[in-house]
Image (cartoon, rainbow, N blue to C red):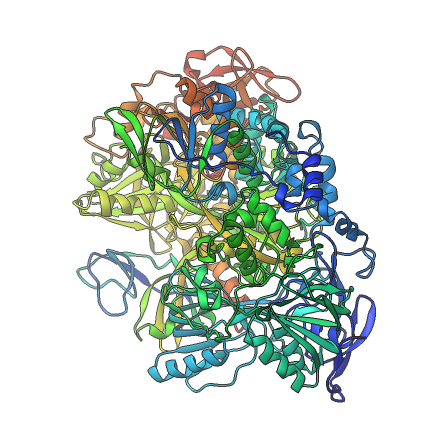
Amino acid sequence: MSGYRLKPIPPGDDVEFEFGGRTLTGHRGEPLAAALLASGIRVVARSFKYHRPRGIVGYGRHEPNAHVGTAKGNALATILRVEDGLKAWPLNCWPSVDFDFGALADRFGALLPAGFYYKTFMGPGGRFWPIFEPMIQRMAGIGKLPTDPAPLRVEKRYAHCETLIVGGGIAGQQAARDAAKAGGRVWLIDDGDVPEISGVTVLRDTLVIARHEGGLFVAVERNPNAAFEARTWKIRAARAILATGTVERPMIFRDNDRPGVMLLSAVRRYARDHGVAAGKSVVVFTNNDSGHRHARELTEMGIAVPAVIDLRDGEAVVAALGCPVRGARIAKLDGSGTRDIACDVIAMAGGFTPLVHLHSHAGGKLRYARDFAAFLPDGSHDGAETRIDLPQDHLLARWEAPDTGGKAFVDFGADVTAADVRLAAREGYDGVELLKRYTTLGMAPDQGRLSNMNALDILAREKGVTPDLVGTTTFRPPFVPTEFAALAEPTGKLLKPSRTTTLTAWHERAGAVMYESGANWRRPGYYPQNGENLDAACARECFAVRNAVGVYDSSPLGKFEVIGQDAGAFLDFVYATRLSDLAPGRGRYALQLHEDGRLFDDGIVFRLSPERYFVTTTTGNADACLQRFEYCRQVLRPDLRVHIVPVTEQWADIVVCGPQARDALAKAGIAPPRDLGFMGMAEIELFRRRCLIARAGFTGELSFEILLPNSAAPALWDRMIAAGAVPVGSEANHVLRIEKGFISVGHEGDGIAGPDDLGLGFAVHAAKPDFVGKAALLRDRTDTSPRPQLVGLLARDPDFVLPEGAAILRADAARGRGYVTASCRSGALGRSLAMGLLEDGRALMGQTVSVSLPGGDAGAIVVKPAFYDVSGGRQRV
Amino acid sequence: MGAYSFADLLRHAFRGPGSAERAWRERPLKDRYDAIIVGAGGHGLATAYNLAARHGLRDVLVLDKGWLGGGNTGRNTVTIRANYLREESIRFHAEGLKLWRELSGVLGYNVMFSERGQLDLIQTWAKLRDVKRRQSTLRLAGVPFDIVSPVEAKRRVPILDLEGDKRLPVLAATWHPTAGIARHDAVAWGYARAASALGVNIVQNCEVRSIARAGGKVAGVETARGFIAADKVALAVSGHASVLAATAGLRLPIETVPLQAFVSEPLKPILSCIVNSPAQVYLCQSDKGELVIGGGSDPVPSYVQRGDFTTIERVAAHLVELFPILGRVRMLRQWAGAIDLCHDTSPIVSKTPVEGLYLDVGWGSGGFKAIPTAGREFADLIAKDMPGDLIGGFALSRFERGRPLYETAGASNRD
Amino acid sequence: MSEVLTLVLGAKPGAGAIPVAPDQWLIAGKAPDGTLSIDVSDAYQAFEVKENILTQGIALDFAKLPADFAGRTRLGEIGVLLSRDGDTWILRCERSYAEWVETWLRTRPGGI
């Protein structure tokens, strides 16, 4: 036994818990670390690289070693609280923390200096790494996955204040009182308990983990009595005071990582706050006044301190003896006067390192304060001022004892020794960032909070410069490791918005297979009846459209009203197609191009009246179109008087298509104007609402597109179904449009093809003075290299459907010259059909090309991309 | 200086750190070099190495405004793969997979290339169509790439959750077995060491402020330490490529955005391959046990190497949805790199209208994997003033000619 | 909640109008005489929401907003309209997002 309780646990506050299979007793609510110390458990973990036995070094967040496992994940023994039924276990050891096979690594430690893995495990030609890698992986790593699958219960909240104070110590409380007097909303956040302060909102058990630009602070609240396990706050503060305090700096000597070597501040906290003595006899090793001051406090609390070894007196602890510690070896700095003192704790007091992480997170710079041998914020940054009081302790800027061999650790968490730092510097990794990356210094879960300054000191000495010329590495959020679930937003069904039409409920009731489609819309792919598969349902739906009548929910289509006296001129500028000469009541297929001349979007634009257009775009591009329209209106052509109103959400769009479309409409009580010709649009009244009806569609059949206010859509849909129209999904639409050779921007658009490549040159009116993409189109004509061109493809075997995406081969067969963009089995033509983009495809009409397939290439004949009703008579009837 | 071996470790074990040799040397700056490479990241150092090793061009200076490998070489999430969309990209990166396998042996420095395969999760029908096209093109290029079932995906990545009614269910997955990862810093250090041994001078903390021209030719560079002349100047930078090129009068079609990365606490091995939910979240497990995680880039262009919190939330959300068991695993560290993106998302490896000025820029989020191939091809370009076949598609002139190389396929669906 | 909504184009029609674009205002009710306007009654879904819920997903500083606040903001990935009605807020989203927004509201601690 080593540690003990200075006073007994009050009756009723004692609880049993389990650590590594042993049942122990602790004080309810105290950190597990305190209970382990009090129970005399000294080895609590194995180290990362060498698997050396490790004990508790620090307190609270500042603990490099004591990672323990629980059913709900990995935690620090210094944070985890003792409760009834707590079960925790040591990590990174097998079979046990007291006897770990991995510790063989320590025996060969001399062969494993910093960066050892860069120099070996290669074998001839570097081919042996795959053999060594898995062994290294198993040795490394620390934690395991949680065994309890219950998700973390998380809340999220935004908050705003005029003054945010981070840290509820003396400085923080004073800052809060001062700020409260000055007025405005004052928030004080601390990860422990803080008294109420009048006029201040206090968040307890809450840790600020990050500061971002613009005064955004992210904090995680852990209230054990609340419904949530973590409440993540996103706080905007006009001004912030960072009173985040300090962490004590360790000393460097042989075997300074042995269980029993601790920070003096931690020994003091366990005694003062939890009544736990970390050991019976504490030797203090310091380089400043605080070591003496705090040693006296220990004595006053009844803990024996046989010696305070002070580097300023020319003496050092040169080695920890025993594992766990049972003594300290003391020597003069010249190595003389060696003596051993029996003790079970060596307490390190190397001065204090300010916690400047939050200042640095958002880009604040630091300056070196020579008096304290510490980096401090160089003024305030982005509204945040750091207030950290450092005691004047007459510190001697030396932390390292004379080298007596063995390992003297700088970074416990990452298992980096002083010799590693020197080696790295001598090999040329002598900048702080290179040092960090080469040795992994500061990359363990504690992010080098205890180690960075000592490493910088060694590096500076190696280079013969002062630490300010070495600088520090960048502090990265989060301040402490934080569960991914506490950061995740939004989750579950809310992960991504999902959009429905007013008919989605009907589609789902009808058993439609729903697809995640462009722009987050959920829409029907096909409506299987009586156990039909996709092909059967799709064929039935296509048959209905070609021979009778189908009805299609096209509501997600992008829709805009463009209104104003310059509406025509505006559309002439945004579209490659001329639209200013459209007669009212007429529509035209129109193209938008990217600035570099490639196809951006297509759709039909109708003119309702001289100053009013109704514009449709593809579903996927609807939002991008609005951005483009407004960019053109506000930035490129502010001279034009025009308003752009997105009305996608106002109008449902129901397409009734097929040779019997007119009869079905009549049965449903809808009479389109007699003179409504192909590509015409007219207003009609349905359900006492103003609606629009157009002769347009994507199927090549007689087709009426009815645009009506969303709330009226279900009634019209029901009537069309009652009138015998067959509901049609996007799979059938795909087949119908291939039969017609209509392009789909998402398939044939491809990102590279221009309008001429796609056979859409007819829709580009280059005579217009200017439009987006015109300059690029004219320029493109100077380039004579082969372009991808849209073609139809007929597989040699009419029963074989060419796979979409399959490459089309060049004559030399080594490289692709195009690919199949869309493919289907056509019921109307009784064979398979496909379209593709093929280099110089139009020059290959009638020729056979090879389509590359895993099981052997398939021949296909290149034809014009139109298969069904090529003259287009059916849609014009 | 030869290849590192176990003997180096033995020597060190017996003689201590005093026996250490510098991995590379910084020599005094001269006022003229045959060639200056701006950027001591993986690309710049690999180029310098190849200039010296392949072309005997050893009077080469590599300059960096910060530390060696401190840009995107040291900030990326180390994925090495060839499952691209366009044939030009596929052939380039397929060559890369070959070079990566040999790299440790060539450099005598263990860059820890680990061919562990990449699993891409397909969660929309549009993406499924996209990968079918990739599969066919990749097969032609001889790159193994298969479409597999969700069950097979789960077999490869046991932490993947397929249960329940997910917002974005896994519809299928693709398996690209020759993909891998490497230790990013080691790549920069290994090339630096090898280049230095051949006589290349590497100077850190010396910012190039502008590129000097004499008429239509490049004259040298203005640096924090004065003017240095050279007949050939090559930019191998990221984050400020467009700013630097502008000093030579070139306007590049590049936008700079932060791309964030995250690591988890170190865990015992739980993930044996790279797993990717395209544009949402991707992860692999480092040899130290940390999960190395990335996602989509930040929504707003910026040169800041930090990152936007909503992006962190979004990446974490996708992570936790796909792998709920990681919900209680803790994020250890977060950072960002500034990536340079051309609007067609392909890089520029090219001559320029300024004679003697060469570009290897605009690699977006994909620069790391390109290091060995780009280093070789860019060195060939600089030495011969003629692009090789593998980089012909990445010429700057493609934008003038209306032949952009879009790596992303059309995004919309069966509408 | 279903309601008559009008989008007024050009000039602000008066108090209570929600700015939705530099030249467009949404008002509850019929178009005022003489304005250029269109009916968007079917384009939005409205929810009455308590501030305590909104602060879980909207980054606005509600305490600083005027009593007659009306404007456009974001709820996660989507754009929404927000206007104040005493102690409660009216949150309007585009109709296609209504199911998503309702799920969001329902699953907040203290939600509807």
Compared across the picture, whether A323 is left or right of A604 comes to: right
Q: Is residue B208 above or below residue A354?
A: above
Quarter of the image with the N terminus of chain A is bottom right
Q: Position of residue A825 (x, y in %)?
A: 57, 26
Closest to the observer: A735 or A661? A735
Query: Which residue, as the protein is rendered here, is positioned at the far bottom?
Result: A11
Q: Is residue A749 above or below residue B121?
A: above
Compared across the picture, whether B335 is left or right of B111 comes to: left
Q: Is residue A662 visible?
A: no
Closest to the observer: A863 or B311? B311
Q: Is residue A777 visible?
A: yes
Q: Position of residue A803 (x, y in %)?
A: 58, 26
Q: Residue at x 58, y 33 (%)?
A: B81
Count of numbered badges drawn on the protein: 0
Q: Is residue B257 above or below residue B210?
A: below
- Tell me the quarter of the picture where residue B121 sits: top right
Q: Position of residue B170 (x, y in %)?
A: 62, 45
Q: Residue at x 49, y 28 (%)?
A: B199
Compared across the picture, whether B33 is left or right of A258 comes to: left
Q: Position of residue C23 (x, y in %)?
A: 23, 55
- Tell me the quarter of the picture where residue B284 sits: top right
Quarter of the image with the C terminus of chain A is top left
- Tell me the quarter of the picture where residue B205 sits: top left
